[in-house]
Amino acid sequence: MRAPPDGYTLLLVSSSGAVNTTLYEKLNYDFIRDIAPVAAIIAVSNVMYVHPSVPARTVPEFIALANANRGKLNMASGGNGSSSHTAGELFKMMTGVNLVHVPYRGQGPALVDLLSGQVQVMFATTPGTTEYVKSGQLRALAVTTLSRAELLPDVPVLGDFVKGYEASQWYGLGAPKNTPAEIVDMLSKETNAALADSKAKARIADLRRNSNCGLASRIREAHRGRNREVGKGDQVRKHQAGVISIP
C-alpha cells in the first residue's frame, strides 16, 4: 500500500480484506481508499455440507431440523472471519436458524470433525472436499454461488431455497492508491487476457477453482454494496460484509 504507484508492485487481494474492514474497528489501512482494484482473478464457491447422520437431505429439511433443535446443531468453520464462517453466519441471519458456531484453526481440522460427526454442518470451500461427497462421507445440500459448481453438478444452488443468498471466496489484484488510471486499465486488460488463455483455464481447473475474469470495478462495487447492506449492524451482521461475490 505504501509502494510507489507505478504499476510495478501489486497486491493479491481477497475477501479477507473485505471481512477485516467490518470485523475490526481499527485498522491502519482502508480497503477502499488505499487499494486501486485491478482485476478479479478467481472465485471459490462454498458448499453446505452435513454429516450423513444428519436427517436432512435438502436445505428446507435442514432449516426445519434446525428450527426444531435450536442451539443443538454445531456449525464448524475454519476460524472467525473465514469464508466458511461468514457464509454460515449469512445463512443463519437470512433463515433465522440458531446454529452453534465452532471455530477451528483452519478448514482441515474442522473438516476432520465434520467427517467424524463431532459437528453437523459446515460451509466449506470446494477444493479438497468434493471427493467426500462421492465417497458418501459427507452430504452436500447446496452450493453458495449463483450457479452450480462444475465438480458438483447435481447439487443445487442455496439461493434457490433462501432468496438473495450468495457467497464466495474471491481473489483479485490491487495496486497502490493513486496509480494512474491508464496503468490500472492496462494491467486489468492484460490480466483478463491471461485468464482467458486456455492454458491458464486448464491450470485453474486443475486447482479446482473457477476463473473469474472481470473488470476491476467489480471488486470495489461488490465490497461497497455489501457494506451498504450491513451498515452498522450487530456483530453477526458485520460478518456479512465479507461474504461478497464478484458478479
Image: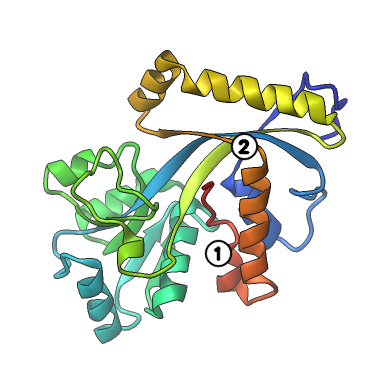
Q: How far across and how far down the image is residue 43, in percent?
A: 47, 40
Q: Determine the secondary structure under disc 1.
A: helix
Classify 10 Å Cα crowding around label 2: few (below 14), some (14-19), many (20 and above): many
User: Does 47 sit left or right of 172 as displayed?
Assistant: left
Quarter holding the N terminus?
top right
Q: How far apart are marks 2 and 1 (CA)?
A: 23 Å
The answer to whether 21 is drawn above or below residue 134 in the figure is: below
Question: Quadrant of residue 165 in the image?
Answer: bottom left
Classify 10 Å Cα crowding around label 1: few (below 14), some (14-19), many (20 and above): many
Q: How far across and how far down the image is residue 27, in percent?
A: 78, 53
Residue name at image x 67 percent, y 43 percent: 217
Q: How far across and how far down the image is residue 100, in percent?
A: 39, 72
- Residue 23 in view: no
Q: What residue type is labelled 1?
A: Gln
The answer to whether 130 is drawn above or below residue 69 in the figure is: above
User: Does 99 sit left or right of 180 as displayed?
Assistant: left
Q: Determine the secondary structure under disc 2.
A: loop
User: In front: mark 2 or mark 1?
Assistant: 2
Labelled pair 2, 1 in contact (Cβ < 8 Å):
no
Q: Which of marks 2 and 1 is nearer the N terminus?
A: 2
Residue name at image x 46 percent, y 17 percent: 197
Residue 240 numbered mark, or none: 1
User: Does 158 sit left or right of 217 as displayed?
Assistant: left
Tell me the residue that label 2 is attached to.
Answer: 215
Q: Which amino acid does label 2 sit on?
A: Leu
In the image as oriented, which residue stretches furthest toward the top? 199
Question: Quadrant of residue 37 in the image?
Answer: top right
The answer to whether 108 is drawn above or below residue 223 in the figure is: above
Residue name at image x 15 percent, y 65 percent: 57
